Amino acid sequence: MYYFLILVMTLMGSIASIFFKRASGSDGMTELLKNRNLYFGGFLYLSAALLNIVVLRYLDYSIVLPLTSITYIWTMFLSHFILKEKFTIRKLSGVLLIFIGAVLITL
């Protein structure tokens, strides 16, 4: 169950980054503070941090922290499908290595 929470936590962090990317298009601090994407992203980051605290209560830090790298995997896919960024061999290779590392950590 805690590994599922890690997946949810990392997905929330990655989605939060998408909202922050959208908020970054604001012109000036005033417009940024009016941008709802900033607040959606902040809420998701805060929620992910709270989930992280819950998970850390039950799993070793030496397992949880490396597994948070799953965020990079989510980010690559979300940026491709939502922001229309391109997959490259370098990105795919990096994500594959992250995935292999995450699997090895959990064994």
Image: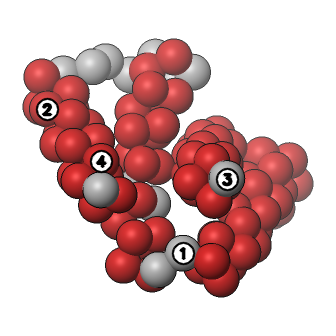
Q: Quadrant of residue 92?
A: top left
What is the distance, in whole Å, between disc 1 and disc 3 at their CAs? 11 Å
Residue that label 4 marks: 103
What is the distance, in whole Å, between disc 2 and disc 4 at their CAs? 15 Å
Residue that label 2 marks: 93
What is the distance, in whole Å, between disc 1 and disc 4 at their CAs? 15 Å
Query: Which sits in the foreground, 57 or 68?
Result: 57
Q: Is mark 1 on a helix, strand or loop?
A: loop
Q: Which amino acid does label 4 sit on?
A: Val
Mark 2 crowdedness (10 Å alpha carbons): few <14, some 14-19, many ≥20: few
Q: Can residue 29 be seen in this view?
A: no
**Which label lies toward us, 2 or 4?**
4
Q: Quadrant of residue 51?
A: bottom right
N-terminal of the two: label 2 or label 4?
A: 2
Query: Which sits in the foreground, 9 or 44?
Result: 9
What is the distance, in whole Å, between disc 1 and disc 2 at their CAs? 28 Å
Q: Which amino acid does label 1 sit on?
A: Leu
Mark 1 crowdedness (10 Å alpha carbons): few <14, some 14-19, many ≥20: few
Task: Answer left or right for 39 relative to 97.
Answer: right
Query: Which sits in the foreground, 50 or 104?
Result: 104
Residue located at (63% from left, 77% from top): 58
x and y percent of residue 61 in the render?
A: 45, 81
N-terminal of the two: label 1 or label 3?
A: 3
